[in-house]
């Protein structure tokens, strides 16, 4: 009789562990997919900005084609913007699991944001009449909207990663996280100004 009781207890404990592990694993998978989905949304907005920048630059170049001299400030700003674009493009396949590369990627995005702001301001000062060109004005509005979307999606990513990391680090879920190979994901590390839309004033 005692033997059957021991076997019964072992079976019950095994079932408890099985269902607990199954529930934890499914929860981690669900949250992990949510993080990946939100990161993809951030990247969509980054790509929107990448697609918009060449149009802005072409519009400015087309407008300034009749100028005999290229303003030094615009030239320097364009060079900085091009460098930032190159850095971002070389890291665009990064995922949150690649911690070091992830941080480098987001630092490059922040530098691109700042370089873009400098470029737009340099253009504004060098070509004050450019505001009359409807296409450039439209692109500027789209740019500002894109920066706001980036800030929004990054905020959502930050929140879902916070929830995920809290679960990964909380007891007893952290035991199952270790067993199944789920680890904390990195957050954005940027200064407060980096998430703000660049100043676009005409």
Image: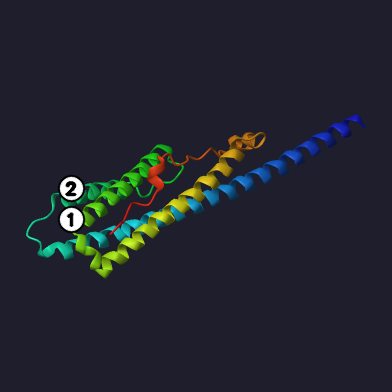
Name the image quarter holding residue 163.
top right
Whether residue 180 is visible here, answered yes or no, is: no
As drawn, the residue found furthest toward the top would be 2
Q: Based on the displayed image, in which of its 4 quarters is residue 166 positioned?
A: top right
**Category of crowding for the residue at label 1, using alpha-carbon neighbours closer than 10 angstroms: few (below 14), some (14–19), many (at least 20):** some
Q: Position of residue 82 (x, y in %)?
A: 23, 50
Please report the residue visible at 40 percent of the width from the left and 56 percent of the height from the top. 45
Q: CA gap, disc 1 to disc 2?
A: 12 Å
Q: Residue 24 location, x and y as percent?
A: 66, 43
Q: Secondary structure at mark 2?
A: helix
Check the picture and name the quadrant holding the N terminus. Answer: top right
Whichever of callouts 1 and 2 sits on the residue coming sooner in the sequence is 2
The kind of secondary structure element at disc 1 is: helix
Residue 144 appears in the rendering: yes
Q: Kindly check if marks 1 and 2 are in contact, taking CB atoms under 8 A apart as contact.
A: no
Kindly identify the residue that appears in the image at 66 percent across and 33 percent down: 171
In the displayed structure image, the side of residue 47 where residue 175 appears, left or right: right
Camera-side residue: 131 or 119?
Answer: 131
Depth check, mark 1 against mark 2: the one in front is 1
Q: Is 60 drawn above or below residue 13 in the view shown?
A: below
Give the side of residue 83 with respect to residue 23, left or right.
left
Q: Name the residue beneath numbered marker 1.
A: 126
Is 16 on the left or on the right of 145, as rendered?
right
Q: Residue furthest left?
A: 68
Estimate the x, y position of residue 32 in percent, counting from the top left.
Answer: 55, 47
**Residue 38, labelled with which disc?**
none
Left or right, 153 with reference to 57: right
Name the foreground residue: 7 vs 82. Answer: 82
Q: Residues within 10 Å of mark 2 (few under 14, many from 20)?
A: some
Image location of residue 196, percent across then percent down: 39, 49
Residue at the spot of label 2: 76
């Amino acid at each position: 009789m005692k033997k059957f009781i021991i076997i019964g207890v072992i079976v019950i404990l095994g079932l408890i562990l099985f269902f607990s592990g199954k529930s934890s694993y499914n929860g981690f998978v669900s949250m992990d997919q949510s993080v990946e989905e939100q990161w993809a949304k951030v990247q969509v907005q980054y790509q929107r900005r990448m697609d918009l920048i060449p149009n802005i630059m072409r519009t400015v170049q087309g407008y300034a084609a009749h100028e005999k001299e290229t303003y030094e400030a615009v030239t320097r700003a364009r060079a900085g913007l091009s460098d930032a674009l190159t850095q971002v493009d070389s890291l665009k396949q990064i995922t949150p699991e690649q911690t070091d590369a992830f941080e480098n990627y987001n630092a490059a995005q922040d530098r691109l944001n700042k370089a873009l702001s400098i470029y737009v301001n340099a253009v504004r000062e060098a070509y004050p009449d450019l505001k009359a060109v409807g296409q450039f004005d439209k692109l500027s509005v789209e740019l500002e909207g894109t920066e706001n979307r980036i800030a929004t999606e990054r905020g959502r990513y930050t929140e879902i990663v916070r929830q995920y990391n809290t679960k990964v680090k909380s007891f007893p879920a952290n035991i199952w996280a270790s067993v199944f190979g789920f680890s904390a994901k990195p957050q954005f590390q940027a200064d407060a100004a980096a998430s703000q839309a660049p100043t676009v004033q005409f």
